[in-house]
Image: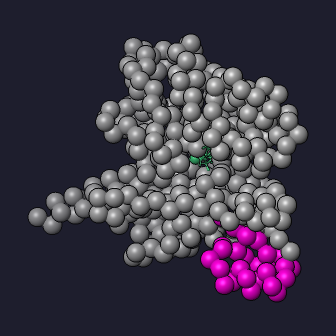
Amino acid sequence: MARGIDIGTMNIVSARQDGGETVFVQQRNSFVEIDYSDMAEQMLSRSDVLHIRKGDDVYVVGDDALNFANIFNQETRRPMSQGILSSEEKSAIPMIKLIIEQVLGEPEQPGERVFYSTPADPIDSDLSTLYHQKTLESFLGDMGFDPEPINEGMAVIYSELADSNFTGLGISFGAGMTNVCLSYYAVPVMTFSVARGGDWIDEQTATATGQTVDKVTSIKEDDFRLDFTTDAGGVEGALSIYYDNLLDYVIEKISDEVNEEDVEEGLDIPVVVTGGTSSPAGFESLFEERFEQASIPFSISSVNKVDDPLYSVARGALVAARSEEGRQQQQAGAEGE
Ligand SMILES: Nc1ncnc2c1ncn2[C@@H]1O[C@H](COP(=O)(O)OP(=O)(O)OP(=O)(O)O)[C@@H](O)[C@H]1O
Ligand SMILES: [Mg+2]
């Protein structure tokens, strides 16, 4: 059975099909360093907290990192930044490997196919995604899988736009990046990313308000609404300002790119927005309002937000993997006749 995995700056999510159901497993792509003691080591070994010991340090990894960070008054650290493996956290390679192993488990048979998400190269920074993509490919290969990269924006199209023949604009508003893909009958016409997303909002808000980034992230993820009426001067007010700014920035880049790409005029296409950063109430309507004002050479038939934005990319990777598997089985069947 083929699988999908979304390896994101903040969340790593795997997807597999179990009968009529898609099963997702998720962990936060983060870790925290705590001082080593025999007591801590014993406690952790008896619990199901993911952790790694390196010399005199113990690292708590994944979902539990945030809890431990709060208790020990530390900031969490992340193996990835701006969509790719972080050059500042080279020592974090074992942590991200552990998280990938935990969410994916072992292959059901050697060489099981897994499609893994990779971002498009960003148009607003000179970061390259190649090293990241190749390194993940080798991790997954070492685990016994047969890995295949899939562009994050294209995964959104596979996941959310089946009903419109995989035609439309898919946007994944993640933590480290925003990935955009325009697809026409499942053929990507334009894919790009910008190196800004939820982390950028959190960092700007933390700087503006003097709060820690972890604190801002918690406030944002806990029932924050984009309504621009509350909390001027507070964290939520600052979050609204930077959300607004991110949307303007992304839409301006989409407009620049489609105008440059000579996309056929007069198309009428659906737009789907997803990714954790699209979660707050009010996001969809703000996006729609801004998008309608932008200079875009095609018309928009609808703007939709998805129900479970953290799972779209993993689901899309699974759809792509299963459709390849289906084609191969058909081919094998035809050859056997
Ligand atoms: N309920 C929520 N409200 C607001 N923001 C949220 C919510 N839940 C998650 N987020 C934010 O969404 C982002 C994570 O989204 P997602 O998992 O789609 O990103 P990612 O795939 O890990 O990152 P990337 O694609 O950029 O590598 C983080 O910035 C997180 O704080
Ligand atoms: Mg993502």
What's the residue at 38%, 37% (across, down)?
161
Residue farthest front in this picture? 230
Height in image: 72 above or below 309?
below
Residue 215, x across and y down, in percent? 78, 48
What's the residue at 53%, 57% (across, down)?
13
Q: Nearer the viewer, residue 50 or 70?
A: 70
Left or right of 195 on screen, residue 161: left
Height in image: 224 above or below 101?
above
Which quarter of the rendering shows the N terminus?
bottom left
What's the residue at 71%, 48% (across, down)?
218
Residue 334, x across and y down, in percent? 16, 60
Q: Is residue 273 visible?
A: yes
Q: Nearer the viewer, residue 75 or 174?
A: 75
Residue 103, x across and y down, in percent? 54, 66
Left or right of 330 on screen, residue 205: right
Residue 281, x across and y down, in percent? 56, 33
Find the magenta span and give its range.
36-62
Height in image: 263 above or below 112?
above
Q: How is the image coloured?
A: one colour
Would you say residue 333 sits in the magenta stretch? no
Residue farthest right in this picture? 210
Q: Quadrant of residue 241?
A: top right
Would you say residue 42 sits in the magenta stretch? yes
Q: Quadrant of residue 289?
A: top right
Residue farthest left in this picture? 337
Q: Is residue 131 visible?
A: no
Q: Nearer the viewer, residue 30 or 240?
A: 240
What's the residue at 21%, 58% (across, down)?
330
